[in-house]
C-alpha cells in the first residue's frame, strides 16, 4: 500500500511537471505548441512506434538508441546518490567521482591500451577512491560530506583536465580536435561491445553508443537492491542512516559503514562514466574547465524521482533521458531544448513535496474506502 502511494506521488510530480512544460510551450507559440512542441517532447524516440514506414523512422530509432545510451550514466549516478542516502549521506560529489571515473577509463584505454572490461574496472576504482575521501573526512573528522564533496568536485575536474591536456602535449590529448582522443581510433578493444547473445544493439537502434552497458546498469541496480534488503551489510547501512547513535549502541561500526558507503557510491558513479566514455561516440573536453559533467547532478534527479530505490532509478533514469532527447526533437527555431531541463527541474522541486502528496493520497484513498464500506453496509 505504502509503495503504491509512493509511486503514485512520483507520477503526480511527473504529470505536474509536464503540465507546466505544456504551459511554457503555449506561452512561446500557442499555434504549434502541441504538434511541434509537446508531441515530440513526450514521444521522442518512441514516435517510431507510431510510424508504419520503418525506413523513414530510422532517425527516430536512432533517438531511441540515444535515449538508452544517455540513460546508462545517469542510472549509475542515480544509484550512487541513492546508495549514499541509505546511509544518511548526501553524495553531491557524484559529478567529481564521475569525472575521475572518466579519467580512469580513458587512461587505461588510451595510454595502457587495456580491453574494455579492464577499463570499466579502472573507472569504478578511480571513482571509488574519490568517493572514499569525503567518507574518511566524515567518519574521522566529522566534516560535512556536502562541503567536502563540492570541493572535491572542482579539484577532480581541474586535476583531470590538467592531466589530459598536459599543456597540449599529453598523449591523451588530440590537438587537432582540442579534445581527448577517440577511444575507437586509438584502441578499438576498449570499446564496449554492442552485441550480447546475438542481439546487435547497433543494428537495432542505429546508434553506436547503445551498447550492452545498459544491461550492466540494470544488473548492478538489482545487485544493489539485494545487498540493501537481503544482507547484514545492507541492514547495517540502513540502521546507521535511520539513527547513527542507536546503531552505534547496537555495536555497528558507523565509521566503517560511512567510508564503505561513500566508496561504493563513488564506484557506481565512476562505472557510469566508464559506460559512457567507452561507448565510442563521446570525447572528453579538457579545455572546458568551468562545467562539471551534467550526469553527476542528473543522478540527484534520478535518485529522488526513483524514490531512492535501485529499481526506481532504472525507470527514472530512462524517463529523464527520454525527456532530454525529446527536447532536442523540437524545432529549435521555435522552442528551446532547455524546456526539457525546466520540466526535470520542476519535477525535482516537486519531489520535495512528495510527503505532502503521499499524505493527501492516503487520506483520499482512506476516505474512498470508507465511503465504499458505508455503501456496502447500506446495501446489506
Image (cartoon, rainbow, N blue to C red):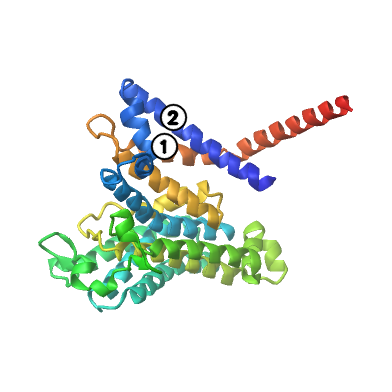
User: Label 2: which residue?
Assistant: 20
- Residue nearest the viewer, comparing 279 with 175: 279
Residue 276 picture quarter: bottom left
Q: Label 1, label 2: how many angstroms apart (C-alpha)?
A: 7 Å
Residue 227 picture quarter: bottom right
Relative image position of residue 263 (x, y in whole percent): 48, 69
Whether residue 341 is visible: no
Relative to residue 67, is residue 184 depicted above or below? below
Relative to residue 136, is residue 91 depicted above or below? above
- Residue nearest the viewer, comparing 82 with 167: 82
What is the quadrant of the N terminus in the image? Answer: top right
- Residue nearest the viewer, comparing 365 with 348: 365
- Residue nearest the viewer, comparing 14 with 235: 14
Dot placed on the residue nearer the N-terminal end, 1 or 2:
2
Which of the numbered marks, if any, corresponds to residue 343? Answer: 1
Residue at the image position 34 percent from the left and 36 percent from the top:
40
Residue at the image position 89 percent from the left and 28 percent from the top:
380
Residue at the image position 44 percent from the left and 59 percent from the top:
76
Relative image position of residue 368 (x, y in whole percent): 73, 30
Residue at the image position 59 percent from the left and 44 percent from the top:
7
In this view, which residue lies farthest toward the left? 176
Relative image position of residue 277 (x, y in whole percent): 30, 63
Disc 2 secondary structure class: helix
Badge 1: residue crowd in 10 Å (few <14, some 14–19, many ≥20): many
The answer to whether the residues at label 1 and label 2 have Cβ atoms under 8 Å apart is yes
Amino acid at each position: 500500500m505504502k509503495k503504491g502511494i509512493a509511486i503514485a506521488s512520483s507520477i503526480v510530480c511527473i504529470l505536474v511537471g509536464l503540465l507546466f512544460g505544456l504551459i511554457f510551450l503555449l506561452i512561446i507559440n500557442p499555434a504549434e505548441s502541441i504538434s511541434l512542441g509537446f508531441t515530440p517532447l513526450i514521444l521522442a524516440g518512441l514516435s517510431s512506434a507510431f510510424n508504419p514506414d520503418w525506413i523513414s523512422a530510422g532517425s527516430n530509432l536512432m533517438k531511441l538508441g540515444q535515449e538508452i545510451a544517455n540513460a546508462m550514466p545517469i542510472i549509475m549516478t542515480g544509484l550512487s546518490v541513492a546508495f549514499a542516502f541509505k546511509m544518511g549521506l548526501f553524495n553531491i560529489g557524484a559529478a567529481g567521482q564521475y569525472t575521475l571515473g572518466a579519467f580512469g577509463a580513458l587512461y587505461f584505454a588510451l595510454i595502457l591500451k587495456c580491453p574494455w572490461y579492464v577499463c570499466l574496472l579502472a573507472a569504478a576504482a578511480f571513482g571509488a577512491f574519490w568517493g572514499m575521501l569525503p567518507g574518511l573526512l566524515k567518519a574521522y573528522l566529522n566534516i560535512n560530506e556536502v562541503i567536502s564533496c563540492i570541493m572535491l568536485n572542482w579539484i577532480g575536474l581541474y586535476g583531470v583536465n590538467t592531466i589530459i591536456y598536459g599543456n597540449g602535449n599529453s598523449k591523451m590529448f588530440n590537438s587537432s580536435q582540442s579534445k581527448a582522443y577517440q577511444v575507437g581510433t586509438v584502441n578499438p578493444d576498449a570499446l564496449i561491445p554492442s552485441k550480447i547473445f546475438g542481439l546487435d544493439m547497433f543494428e537495432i537502434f542505429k546508434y553506436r553508443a547503445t551498447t550492452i552497458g545498459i544491461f550492466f546498469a540494470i544488473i548492478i541496480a538489482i545487485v544493489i537492491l539485494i545487498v540493501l534488503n537481503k544482507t547484514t551489510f545492507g541492514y547495517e547501512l540502513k540502521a546507521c542512516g535511520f539513527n547513527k547513535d542507536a546503531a552505534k549502541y547496537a555495536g555497528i561500526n558507523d565509521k566503517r559503514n560511512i567510508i564503505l558507503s561513500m566508496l561504493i557510491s563513488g564506484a557506481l558513479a565512476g562505472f557510469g562514466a566508464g559506460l559512457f566514455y567507452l561507448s565510442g561516440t563521446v570525447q572528453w573536453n579538457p579545455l572546458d574547465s568551468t562545467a562539471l559533467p551534467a550526469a553527476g547532478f542528473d543522478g540527484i534527479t534520478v535518485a529522488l524521482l526513483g524514490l531512492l530505490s535501485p529499481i526506481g532509478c532504472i525507470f527514472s533514469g530512462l524517463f529523464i533521458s527520454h525527456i532530454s532527447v525529446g527536447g532536442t526533437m523540437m524545432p529549435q527555431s521555435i522552442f528551446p531544448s532547455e524546456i526539457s531541463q525546466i520540466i526535470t527541474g520542476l519535477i525535482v522541486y516537486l519531489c520535495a513535496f512528495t510527503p505532502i502528496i503521499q499524505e493527501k493520497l492516503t487520506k483520499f484513498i482512506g476516505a474512498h474506502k470508507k465511503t465504499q464500506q458505508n455503501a456496502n453496509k447500506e446495501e446489506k
